[in-house]
Amino acid sequence: MFGMFKKDPAEKLRKEHARLLSEAHRLSTVDRARSDEMTAKAAEVEAKLIALQDGTS
């Protein structure tokens, strides 16, 4: 009954990935090193998302 209210972990990772990429884009004109850092974090989140999807598929 309460299972329908559970959050999808993949959706949470997608939102985090989008947020990190957006922040990286914003920083790309201001601080290139931090932009690269955010892009690397987004890549890590993307790898987790792919692993999660491969595990459930």
Image (cartoon, grey):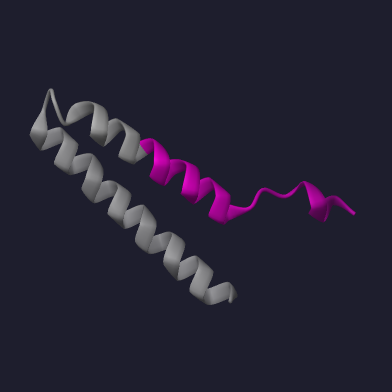
Q: What kind of secondary structure does the magenta stretch mostly adopt?
A: helix
Task: Give the vertical position of 57 relative to 43 (above or below).
Answer: below
Quarter residue 18 falls in: top left
Q: Image point 78% across, 46% down: which residue?
A: 5
Magenta segment range?
1-19
Q: Where is residue 23 in the image (x, y as percent from the top left)?
A: 30, 31
Q: Image point 72% across, 50% down: which residue?
A: 6
Q: Is residue 17 magenta?
A: yes
Count the labels in the image: 0
Q: Position of residue 49 (x, y in %)?
A: 45, 60
Q: Where is residue 35 in the image (x, y as percent from the top left)?
A: 18, 36
Name the side, left or right, on which 28 lies relative to 49: left
Looking at this view, is 8 or 29 the one in front? 29
Specify the quadrant that holds the N terminus: bottom right
Task: Give the vertical position of 3 relative to 27 (above or below).
Answer: below
Q: Position of residue 56 (x, y in %)?
A: 59, 73
Quarter residue 48 falls in: bottom left
Specify the quadrant that holds the C terminus: bottom right
Name the side, left or right, on which 5 lies relative to 57: right
Looking at this view, is 42 or 29 the one in front? 29
Looking at this view, is 4 or 19 the one in front? 19
Q: Image point 48% across, 49% down: which residue?
A: 14
Q: Residue furthest right?
A: 1
Task: Give the vertical position of 19 relative to 12 (above or below).
Answer: above
Q: Does the magenta stretch include residue 16?
A: yes
